[in-house]
Image (cartoon, rainbow, N blue to C red):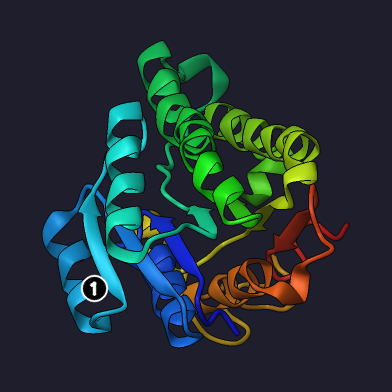
């Protein structure tokens, strides 16, 4: 399904990004796993094998992005897919939010993907096209109590995705956003959410999502099966935003 393609996946040392890296590699892609968690990221790459490399990466730093792109080109010769998966989640009511925390969220959740798109565009143009998949959130589709700062970054990523899709369409570079709901990953550890049917009644499907749910959608958007889709939002939230 992805034979010959090369994918860069940020925040792939664990959780959702790890599931995406494993699924894309299993579908034939060569994957560049990036994260600040060096030991975990290298372990994921080693377990996948020769079709994967790990690069330690600060998504909020343009020079770090340049190093990722160069590593991908040195190892595999091209870049066809970028999954902007790395993010942090912090919550606070608007009157208790701080400028420092807001700016940290902006740097990682919004400026990071912006820098990433800029970094891979030349390689994707050289490959005559590509797919950029920005992992936003249900908080990028609707307001959620206590998520003013986080939601602002995820709404911003949704808007960035749409505008970039218009800018890059003539280059056959597709840009779409994915909006997960409650997904059982280390990022939401401690919230009390449990896996299992019937354990999350807030969602019409009555369960918390798992990383593989999101990875399956990412695989579709990375593949030629979605070749006529760009500038679109995909909610993957068990129906939470259906109402």
User: Residue 122: image x %, image y %?
Assistant: 53, 40
User: Residue 23: image x %, image y %?
Assistant: 47, 81
- Closest to the observer, 181 or 23: 23
Residue that appears at 47% across and 39% down: 116
User: Farthest residue in the right direction?
Assistant: 243
Relative vertical location of residue 214 with respect to residue 86 in this rendering, above or below: below
Indicate left or right for 112 with 2 as reference. Answer: left
Residue that appears at 43% across and 42% down: 89
Tell me the element at label 1: helix
Q: Quadrant of the C terminus?
A: bottom right
Kindly indicate the quadrant of the structure image that contains residue 11.
bottom left
- Closest to the observer, 224 or 59: 224
Q: Is residue 136 visible?
A: no
Indicate left or right for 13 with 15 as reference. Answer: left
Number of labels in the image equals 1
Disc 1 crowd rating (10 Å Cα; few below 14, some 14-19, many 20+) is many
User: Residue 60: image x %, image y %?
Assistant: 36, 30
Relative vertical location of residue 225 with respect to residue 193 in this rendering, above or below: below
Relative vertical location of residue 40 with respect to residue 106 in this rendering, above or below: below
Kindly indicate the quadrant of the structure image that contains residue 220.
bottom right
Question: Residue at label 1?
Answer: 44
- Closest to the observer, 159 or 48: 48
């Amino acid at each position: 399904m992805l034979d010959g393609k090369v994918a860069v996946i940020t925040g792939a040392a664990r959780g959702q990004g790890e599931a995406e890296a494993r699924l894309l590699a299993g579908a034939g892609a060569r994957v560049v796993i990036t994260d600040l968690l060096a030991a975990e990221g290298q372990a994921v790459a080693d377990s996948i094998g020769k079709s994967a490399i790990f690069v330690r990466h600060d998504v909020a730093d343009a020079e770090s992005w340049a190093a990722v792109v160069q590593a991908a080109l040195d190892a595999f010769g091209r870049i066809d897919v970028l999954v902007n998966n790395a993010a942090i989640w912090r919550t606070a009511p608007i009157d208790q939010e701080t400028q420092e925390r807001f700016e940290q969220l902006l740097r990682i959740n919004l400026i990071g993907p912006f820098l990433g798109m800029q970094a891979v565009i030349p390689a994707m143009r050289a490959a005559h096209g590509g797919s950029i998949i920005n992992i936003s959130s249900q908080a990028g589709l609707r307001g959620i109590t206590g998520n003013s700062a986080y939601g602002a970054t995820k709404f911003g990523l949704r808007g960035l995705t749409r505008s970039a899709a218009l800018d890059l369409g003539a280059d056959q570079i597709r840009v779409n956003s994915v909006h997960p709901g409650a997904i059982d990953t280390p990022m939401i550890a401690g919230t009390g959410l449990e896996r299992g049917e019937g354990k999350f009644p807030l969602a019409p499907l009555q369960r918390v999502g798992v990383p593989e749910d999101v990875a399956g959608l990412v695989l579709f958007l990375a593949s030629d099966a979605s070749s006529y889709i760009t500038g679109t939002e995909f909610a993957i939230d068990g129906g939470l935003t259906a109402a």
